[in-house]
Image (tube, rainbow, N blue to C red):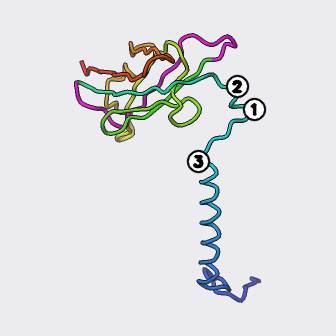
């Protein structure tokens, strides 16, 4: 025995007016949530973060900009509490990137960093590297960067396919 409600499947008893009202309320709720998320508030957790300094730059391969590559910085010396921090960014079509450690654009912690740069995709079930895979591993990339509070930290990574 099946029990059926008085409204046809896929409709509501409130019709389109009910849907529009629900959509408007949902839209207003999402908009207010996004507005609240646009500003970061300092809290007990974020006050413990180490200082970060804006860090970015450009990635090229054989002189051409590399878009959609992931750039990762990993501090080579942990801090006094033995914490090591990683910063990451993605290049735009012109090869430009800006790093984030905790929040978008907050940069990297001061110090010497090992750097990896990777860009890959899946083709026919296999991983294909758009730039040489040696740049994707800290042990083989050969890339380092010094982040300081006294300089602009605008870096240029000129990669070679050879």
Return the x and y of residue 68 as percentages of the image width and height.
37, 37
Tell me, yes or no, whether the two marked residues, 1 and 3, touch with CB atoms within 8 Å.
no
Question: How much space separates mark 2 and mark 3, taking CA atoms?
Answer: 21 Å
Residue at the bottom extreme of this rendering: 6
**Which residues, given as a range, are shown in magenta?**
63-83
- Frontmost residue, 82 versus 51: 51
Residue 20: within the magenta? no
In this view of the protein, which residue sits in the foreground, 8 or 43? 43
Q: Secondary structure at mark 1?
A: loop
Residue under label 2, please give it.
Answer: 48
Q: Callout 3: 10 Å neighbours few (<14), some, many (20+)?
A: few
Q: Position of residue 150 (x, y in %)?
A: 48, 16
Residue 159 sits in which quadrant? Answer: top left
Residue bearing the label numbered 1:
44
* Marks 1 & 2, CB-CB < 8 Å contact: yes
- Residue at x-position 60% and y-position 80%: 10
Question: What residue sits 40% from the left and 32% below the top?
Answer: 97
């Amino acid at each position: 025995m099946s029990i059926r409600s008085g409204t046809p499947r896929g409709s509501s008893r409130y019709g389109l007016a009910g849907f529009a009202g629900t959509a408007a309320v949902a839209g207003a709720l999402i908009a207010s949530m996004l507005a609240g998320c646009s500003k970061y508030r300092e809290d007990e957790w974020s006050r413990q973060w180490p200082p970060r300094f804006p860090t970015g730059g450009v990635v090229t391969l054989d002189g051409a900009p590399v878009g959609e590559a992931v750039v990762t910085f990993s501090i080579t010396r942990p801090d006094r509490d033995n914490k090591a921090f990683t910063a990451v960014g993605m290049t735009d079509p012109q090869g430009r990137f800006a790093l984030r450690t905790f929040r978008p654009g907050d940069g990297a912690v001061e110090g010497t960093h090992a750097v990896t740069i990777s860009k890959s995709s899946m083709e026919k079930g296999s991983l294909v590297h758009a730039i040489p895979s040696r740049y994707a591993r800290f042990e083989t990339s050969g890339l380092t960067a010094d982040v300081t509070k006294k300089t602009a930290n605008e870096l240029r990574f000129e990669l070679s396919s050879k």
